[in-house]
Amino acid sequence: MISEPNSKDSLNSALDGQFPIKPSNAFWWGLFGSMLPEVLRLYKIAVAGQSQPTFHAYYIIISVIFVVCAGFFSVAWKPESSFKAIWVGASFPILVSTLVHNAPALSIP
């Protein structure tokens, strides 16, 4: 007979990084992490006393698509903890920016 692990054993295993978190949790934590750089940018603008930027519908649509992509990227990374999922989500904007700025030019023969 196989015994089910109790919740305390499961929690300890998760904290020790012995198995990844659920994909749905990785998605939401990654999505949250991807929003942190923008929140920090807006906070710095507010603290500096500068005028708040105007957000057009295009910016909001692109931002939503971007954070959803970061959530999927976090799921693909298979983080062992919620902190790693947040880190992956927060790193996603930097990764995309680096890829866009350093992408080789397409040459058409």
Image (cartoon, rainbow, N blue to C red):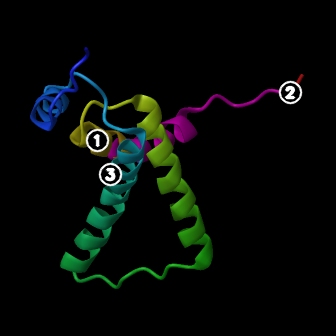
**Tags 3 and 1 in contact by the CB under 8 Å rule?**
yes
Out of 22 and 44, give the one closest to the viewer.
22
Q: Alpha-carbon neighbours of circle 3 within 10 Å: few (<14), some, or many (≥20)?
A: many
* Quarter that holds the C terminus: top right
Q: Alpha-carbon neighbours of circle 1 within 10 Å: few (<14), some, or many (≥20)?
A: some
The residue that mark 3 highlights is 33
Secondary structure mostly seen in magenta is helix
**What range of the chain is rendered magenta?**
90-107
Question: Could you tell me which secondary element the residue under label 3 belongs to?
Answer: helix
| Direction from residue 58 to residue 46 in the image, left or right | left
Of discs 3 and 2, which sits in the foreground?
3
Residue 23 colored in magenta in the image: no
Residue at 86% across, 27% down: 108
The residue that mark 2 highlights is 108
Residue 97 colored in magenta in the image: yes
Residue at 34% across, 85% down: 51
**Above or below, 8 relative to 17:** below
Q: Amino acid at mark 2?
A: Ile
**First reached walking from the N terminus: tag 2 or tag 1:** 1
Q: Alpha-carbon neighbours of circle 2 within 10 Å: few (<14), some, or many (≥20)?
A: few
The residue that mark 1 highlights is 87
Out of 106 and 88, give the one closest to the viewer.
88
**Above or below, 18 relative to 91:** above
Q: Tell me the quarter of the picture where residue 43 sits.
A: bottom left
Q: Amino acid at mark 1?
A: Trp
Question: Could you tell me which secondary element the residue under label 1 belongs to?
Answer: helix
Out of 1 and 54, give the one closest to the viewer.
1
Q: CA distance from mark 2 to mark 1?
A: 38 Å
**Tags 3 and 2 in contact by the CB under 8 Å rule?**
no
**First reached walking from the N terminus: tag 3 or tag 2:** 3
**First reached walking from the N terminus: tag 3 or tag 1:** 3
**Percent position of residue 89, x then y:** 37, 45
